[in-house]
Each structure stands twice: as C-alpha cells, then as structure tokens.
Amino acid sequence: MNIKNLKQLRTAVAPFEKSTVKISVWQLVNTILPFVLLWVAAYKSLSISYILTFAIAIAAAGFLVRIFIIFHDCSHFSFFKNRKANKILGTITGILTLFPYSKWQHSHSIHHATSSNLDKRGVGDLWMMTIEEYENASLLLKIKYRLYRNPFIMFILGPIYEFLLANRFNRKGARTKERLNTYITNISIVLLAVLLGSTLGWSSFLLVQLPIFLISGSVGVWLFYVQHTFEDTYFEEDKNWDYVKAAVEGSSFYHLPKWMQWLTGNIGYHHVHHLSPRVPNYNLEQVHKQTEPLQNVPTITLASSLRSLKFRLWDEKDKKFISFYEWKKQKKPLSISARSEMP
C-alpha cells in the first residue's frame, strides 16, 4: 500500500477516533449491570438446579468478555477522552477480568506495533514458529511447541495459567507505577474473592465463578487466536513489513452473528482496530462500512474459523499457515517409483 493510500485511509478513519461519553457510559451500564445481575441469578439458582446455574453462567461469561473489551479500549485510551478516566476504569475492569491494567497495556501496545512482523514476535503474541525455526529446534523445544499449540492446552489450560498465574507477576524491567498497579489489582482480586467466598460460602462462590471464568477465558483466547491465525493472513520480515498491510491483511474481519458481535464488543472488526486502536469499540463497525478499502479484507465466519485449529507452522516460502500433517507430507522422501520416474 503506497503512501497516498495510507494517508487516505487514516483521513477516512480519523473522524471515528473520538469517544462519546454518553455512549461509553451507556455501554458500561448495559455491560456491567447485566453481568452483576446474572452472577446473582446464578448464585440464587444453585438451590434449584446446577444445570440452570451453568446456563446462567454461560450468559454471564459472555458479558465478562464484553467487560474485557471495555478494559481493552481503556488500554488504548479510546473509551474515554480523559487518560486518567481510562486508567481508573481499566484498573477496575482489570480486577473483574483478572488482568493488571498497566502490565497488559505495555505488552499489548508492543503487539500492535509489531503484529505480523516475523522478526519482532514474542511480546503480546501467541507463540508461532516458522517451518525453518521448528526444523532447527531441539527435540525438547519441539515438544513444548506441540503442547502449546494443542487446542486443549491453548484454549482450556492456557487461560487458567495465563489469567490466574502469569498475570499475577510483574514483567522484568517494569517501572514502579506498573508494579504498583499489578499489586493493587492482585490485592483487590483477593479481597473480592474473600468477601464473596466468606459471605456466600466458598463452594457456592466457586460453583458460580469457575464456569464464568473458564468459559470467558477460553472465548477470549479463541478470539485473539483466530484474529491473527487464518487463511490468507499476512506475515513479513521486518525489511518488508508494512503497518497498514499488517492491520488490514494480518488481522481478520470475523463476521459474527449480531448477538455475538454485540457481546464481543465488535472486536471481530479487528482489521479496523489494528489500523487505528484509538477507535472506540462502538465505532468499529461504522468505520468498516464507511471505508471501502476496509471492506475488501480477509473475512472469516464461525464455520470457516474452525479451520484455523489445524494451523501450526508458518510457511515463509508460500506465505501461509500449514498443519503438522502438511509439514510431514512436505518432508516425506519421494517413493522409489516416484524417483525412478524423475529424469
């Protein structure tokens, strides 16, 4: 994409980068209030049937995902115009979603600055190896990578480790304010859990909170995974990497049913978000519809997104994801008959 097209895109998106206090406040009301009411309803339903409790917990998990999108907007200073308001709300929603605001903001900003850049992977990204890297890796590293890319570990065990354990510790080199934010978040999480556990009973608290946490965590990791792991995606070495191409070609348009789009805070318009992180989540769809170049981006649906589960390695030569099975087929030596036919 040339400089002229880049400027045109940024000019077209700029009017949507301003948040609206009225809309942001209403989104808080229609997200956090239903979550609290559903949590209470799930607790009350324990005396009736756990099947009913679990069903309500699924709905509450959807709203917790939506709370995370608000947290996510705050990290980009796009939910409110005031930076301090974003930090305060980001910290509060981070407590609810188990994410320390300042720590995540740091890693996520790096993710945006280096997304789809093969030479700058690592911070804020899911672990992805190229064919060459995998073939040159030690046996132990290959085993670790295969385990990491296993769907059960990535979408079930992974969120448990990441949200409950990894998020509790500061990164190396974190500044004092970032460290304090992590401590405040951790202490608040413990106090909230102790308050609810001691008041409602620990078994009741866990029977409600655990399914909400597990379901929302799995959905969150899936959304992040599928938005950068899909057919026809974009990855380039640093010398050929382009920010706009990485945004509109390396981030998917996840075309979801309207109710799922609403619960996930329009994050399916991920190409718009990566092009301009300052666009609030409630403006993403409008940007997509009113900016013609953004309508011609890789589009995935619920059905087609499932194919991404087989993607394991990045083929730098053909510029596409392949499965371990496809990699083995490439490595398989020619049969005797095939070799005899060669000139």
Image: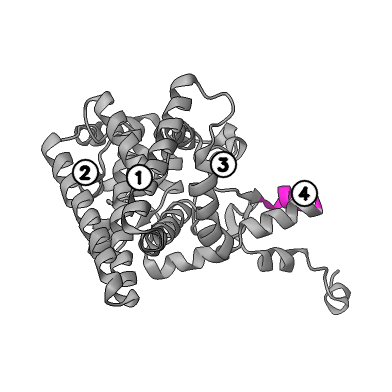
Report the magenta stretch's main SS. Answer: helix
The residue that appears at 32% across and 41% down in the rendered structure is: 93
Q: Quadrant of residue 218?
A: bottom left
Residue type, numbered disc 4:
Ala
Dot 1: few (<14), some (14–19), or many (≥20) neighbours within 10 Å?
some
Q: Gap in Å between the C-alphas at discs 2 and 3?
A: 29 Å
Q: CA distance from mark 2 to mark 4?
A: 43 Å
Label 3 amino acid?
Glu
Kind of element beneath mark 2: helix
Q: Position of residue 202 (x, y in %)?
A: 40, 58
Say whether disc 4 or disc 3 marks the residue closer to the N-terminus. Answer: 4
Quarter occupied by the N terminus: top left
Q: Which mark is residue 283?
A: 2
Secondary structure under tag 4 reads: loop
* Alpha carbon separation for disc pair 2 and 1: 33 Å
What percent of the width, then of the height, locates residue 193? 38, 48
- Label number found at residue 137: 4
Residue farthest to the left?
22
Viewer-proximal residue, 22 or 314? Answer: 22
Q: Which mark is residue 236?
A: 3
Q: Which residue is mark 1?
A: 192
